[in-house]
Amino acid sequence: MSKIDVAIIGASGYTGGELMRILLRHPKVNISTVTSRKNEGESVSNLHPNLEDVDLEFTNPETKDIDADVVFSALPHGASMKLVPDYLDNGSKVIDLSGDFRFSDVNVYEKWYGIEHLHPELNAVFGLPEINREQIKNADLIANPGCFPTGAILSSLPIVENQLVDRIILDSKSGVSGAGVKPNANTHYPTCSDNIKPYAIANHRHTPEIREQLRNFGSKDVKVSFTPHLVPVIRGIITTNHSFLLKDDVSAEDIYKLYREYYKDEPFVKVLKDNKIPLLASVRGSNYCQIGGISLDDENQLVIISAIDNLVKGASGQAIQNMNIMFGFDETEGLKELGLYP
């Protein structure tokens, strides 16, 4: 197959930059369009200095003039849904990195995002390859998962699918890049440095996304609580998954073996040898999710740790993984880089 043409809409942000960084190394991709309304005519290196020698400029074409095999929509929620139908009408496949198409029930979206959904008629495949690989192959519209849900769901799937737990508490720590490129009071250096800041402690909009996907794989009654924290690092999400086992005759070693078997054929989920504890530094810059530290205390509480790079497996890398599946490429194409430890 010859190279496919790729358009990146909203390429001025961190996810757009990561899409370019990774796709520029992809042997089967030609980046034909990168858009930014505010930065039209500028070199991409003006905003993404790591792309200094890249011959690409931001453009602002009419939607009808975007001719690409696949469109990555890296626009904010609310903005993306306005344009996605036009990209589909142009004959492009679309991978949307916003939250606009992640829910099977539009009412859930409208409740948690607080805006009316303009295109409830569009059906997207939730783009977590580890659970929807076959559906992704034939999809025209992919809803790329959120960064928090990616690490949370992958840390939970085996115990939920095997109905070993009925309640999960997820405590996630995220780097500042998860807040996006636009500065705000929460990401101001004196606020976030030397500090850990819980936020949206009981009502983060990624909560229903995690719940919906886990309930598709286990008991419909599984309860999920999620609280994120901002920590003073640039990249990464580490999630501590707490739950109580429903059976007394299951050991931590049993759970560890379950996870090793469950993910043994997944190219980007690594259940660590010897049950080592995942580190943010080990996945930085990579498309890998590491899982480990699986422990059981004397009150039968299970603890599982996962770590991802929020900008790669949590966003742009996973989007490219989905693209590879959609176009019949090797799923790992362009994504084989290991983490940037230390």
Image (spheres, rainbow, N blue to C red):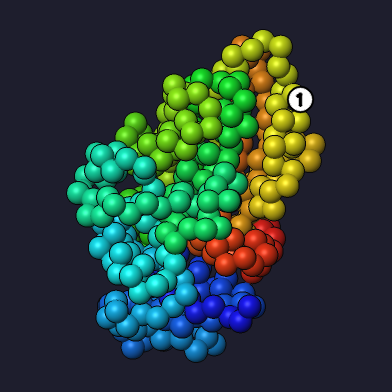
Residue 333 image point, x, y percent: 66, 67
Where is the C terminus found, in terms of image quarters? bottom right
Mark 1, secondary structure of its residue: helix
Q: Which residue appears at 62% of the width and 32% of the height?
A: 158
- Disc 1 residue type (three-letter): Glu
Find residue 21 and report its horizontal and vertical position in percent: 55, 73
Q: Nearer the viewer, residue 145 or 296?
A: 145
Residue pushed farthest right?
A: 274
- Look at the image and tell me whether residue 133 can be seen: yes
Depth order, front residue of 142/288: 142
Q: Residue placed at 36% from the left, 67% from the top?
A: 88
Residue closest to the eye, 194 or 246:
246
State the image coordinates of residue 131 (x, y, percent, origin top left). 57, 44
| Classed neighbour count for the residue bearing mark 1: other residues with Cα under 10 Å, few (<14), some (14–19), many (≥20) | few
Give the left or right position of residue 115, taking residue 257 as reference.
left
Total label count?
Answer: 1
Q: Image point 80% across, 36% down: which residue? A: 274
Residue 314 in view, yes or no: no
Vertical position of residue 10 compared to residue 217: above or below: below
At 53% across and 51% down in the image, what residue appears?
A: 135
The residue that disc 1 covers is 253
Q: Is residue 181 above or below residue 258?
A: below
Quadrant of the image for the N terminus?
bottom right
Percent of width and height locating residue 54: 52, 86
Of residue 234 and residue 274, the one placed in the foreground of this image is: 274
